Image (cartoon, rainbow, N blue to C red):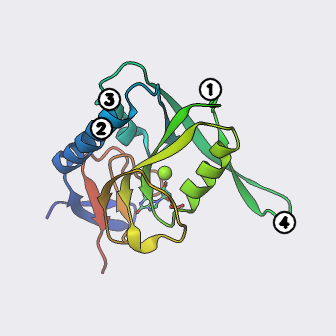
Amino acid sequence: MKRVKIHDKEFELFISHEKIQSVVEQMAEKMNAELVGKNPLFLCILNGSFMFAAELFKRINFVESEISFVKLASYVGDQTTGTVKELIGLNEDIEGRTVVVLEDIVDTGITIDNIQQQLKRMNPKEVLVATMLLKPDALKKDVDLKYVGIEIPNDFIVGCGLDYDGHGRNLIDIYSIVKE
Ligand code: 5GP
Ligand code: MG
């Protein structure tokens, strides 16, 4: 089994690039049928989702669609709110629009739940979530995920945009941590 070492940890090949591509292809086909005519705004959540977003968006086959890139910035709120994660970089007016959030992975669901809540305050027509990967066993929030690529076990993975302490995003396959 193909292995890679990142910092202090070993990872082994888990999902091939070919598999990822065929799954993303299927997701795009569904979107092409369901979102055509809606002029959707795809929102790529940086950093992790950039590869998934690129693979997906080049397979969207209608030109009336847009993509934008946003980030979650953590800052320490007041004593009652603790650490707040604010969506930054959104310059588009999303009022009345179909927004498709592109996430690399949904783990506990806390991040995507938070993003959805922030977007909904801006009065979009609808907020749909597309995630390349989902860890169903880790979910803590009841989130509505419209497009899900691959369900995976609750193990730490890297590759295809996902990192371990900054490294591993450029791996074209997905690797799972080796448990000693
Ligand atoms: P959640 O809020 O759903 O628990 O976590 C979502 C975020 O945690 C993802 O967008 C991703 O950045 C990070 N994450 C969750 N699981 C993994 C994983 O297995 N590997 C990596 N590299 N990041 C993960
Ligand atoms: Mg992410």
Depicted 109 relative to depicted 67: above or below: below
Badge 2 or badge 1: first in the primary sequence: 2
Q: Which residue is mark 2?
A: 28
Image quadrant in which you'd find residue 84: bottom right
Secondary structure of the residue carrying numbered label 4: loop
Verify CB contact (< 8 Å) between mark 2 and mark 3. yes
At x 36% / y 42%, what residue is drawn? 52
**Crowdedness near tag 3: few (<14), some (14–19) or many (≥20) residues, C-alpha within 10 Å:** many
Depicted 108 relative to depicted 146: above or below: below
Mark toward the viewer: 2 or 4: 2
Q: Is residue 61 left or right of residue 113?
A: left
- Extreme residue in the left direction: 1
Badge 1 or badge 4: first in the primary sequence: 4
Q: Which residue is mark 4?
A: 80
Badge 2 or badge 3: first in the primary sequence: 2
Q: CA distance from mark 2 to mark 1?
A: 23 Å
Residue type pointed to by label 1: Glu
Q: Which residue is mark 3?
A: 60
Q: CA distance from mark 1 to mark 3?
A: 20 Å
Residue 145, x across and y down, in percent: 44, 55
Q: Which residue is mark 1?
A: 92
Secondary structure of the residue carrying numbered label 1: loop
Q: Is residue 17 left or right of residue 56?
A: left
Badge 2 or badge 4: first in the primary sequence: 2
